[in-house]
């Protein structure tokens, strides 16, 4: 299994300590979540250089609230600790592959400069 279960205990460490991190926010009762799970799992096997994390919103309700998760599944993409993408909805395989490609190609120096500009 190429995905990692994330919790409040390891969330920040995972985001900060890895290059690219994709997170699937899900729940067992969610039909679209169950449809997206195999797509996410397959991508995790195709991209061993990326951390693919799964967060069960039922088990991690306070973490989901902190992340302002209001609809599931929600997919988040982080790179170098910076949130680049956060959208609800189950992505089809080609869309997830495209998102991964875009995150990999990003000029992170430009992203960091933009973040610094917005924070000042």
Image: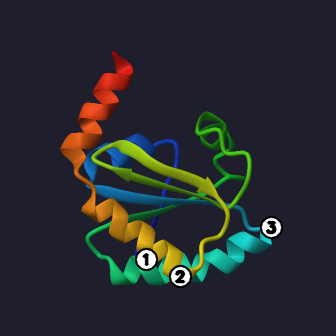
Q: Are marks 1 and 2 in contact (CB under 8 Å)?
A: yes
Question: What secondary structure is found at the residue carrying circle 3?
Answer: loop
Query: x%, y% of residue 60?
Result: 63, 47
Residue density around tag 2, few if under 14, some if 14–19, many if 20 or more, within 10 Å: some
In which image quadrant can residue 35 be found? bottom right
Q: Which residue is most to the left?
A: 109
State how far apart marks 2 and 3 are (Cα). Answer: 22 Å
Q: Is residue 107 left or right of residue 84?
A: left
Q: Which image quarter: residue 61?
A: top right
Disc with the residue nearer the chain's start (2 vs 3) = 3
Disc 2 marks which residue? 93
Quarter where residue 25 is shown? bottom right
Q: Mark 3 packing: few (<14 Cα in 10 Å), some, or many (20+)?
A: few
User: Which quadrant, please, contains the N terminus?
Assistant: bottom left
Q: Tell which of 71 and 117 is nearer to you.
A: 117
Quadrant containing the C terminus is: top left
Label 1 crowd (10 A; few <14 / some 14-19 / many >=20): some
- From the viewer's side, name the closer residue of 28 and 108: 108
Q: Which label number is shown at residue 29?
A: 3
Q: Residue under circle 1?
A: 97
Q: Where residue 116 sits: x, y (%)?
A: 29, 26
- Distance, label 1 to label 3, CA atoms, is 26 Å
Residue at horizontal 32 percent and vertical 58 percent from the top: 20
**From where the camera sits, is residue 118 visible?**
yes
Q: Position of residue 117 (x, y in %)?
A: 31, 24
The answer to whether the residue labelled 1 contacts the one labelled 3, judged by CB atoms less than 8 Å apart, is no
Instruction: Determine the secondary structure under disc 2.
Output: helix
Q: Is residue 79 placed above or below 24 in the rendered structure?
A: above
31 lies left or right of 24: right
Instruction: Please name the residue shown 23% across and 47% down the image.
Output: 108
* Count of marks placed on residues: 3
């Amino acid at each position: 299994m190429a995905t990692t279960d994330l919790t409040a205990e390891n969330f920040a460490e995972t985001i900060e300590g890895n290059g690219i991190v994709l997170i699937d926010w899900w729940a067992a009762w969610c039909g679209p979540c169950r449809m997206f799970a195999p797509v996410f799992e397959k991508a995790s096997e195709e991209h061993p250089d990326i951390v693919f994390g799964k967060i069960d919103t039922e088990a991690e309700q306070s973490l989901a609230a902190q992340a302002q998760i209001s609809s599931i599944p929600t997919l988040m993409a982080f790179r170098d600790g910076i949130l680049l993408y956060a959208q609800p909805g189950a992505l089809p395989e080609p869309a997830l592959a495209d998102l991964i490609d875009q995150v990999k190609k990003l000029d992170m120096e430009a992203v960091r400069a933009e973040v610094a500009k917005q924070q000042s």
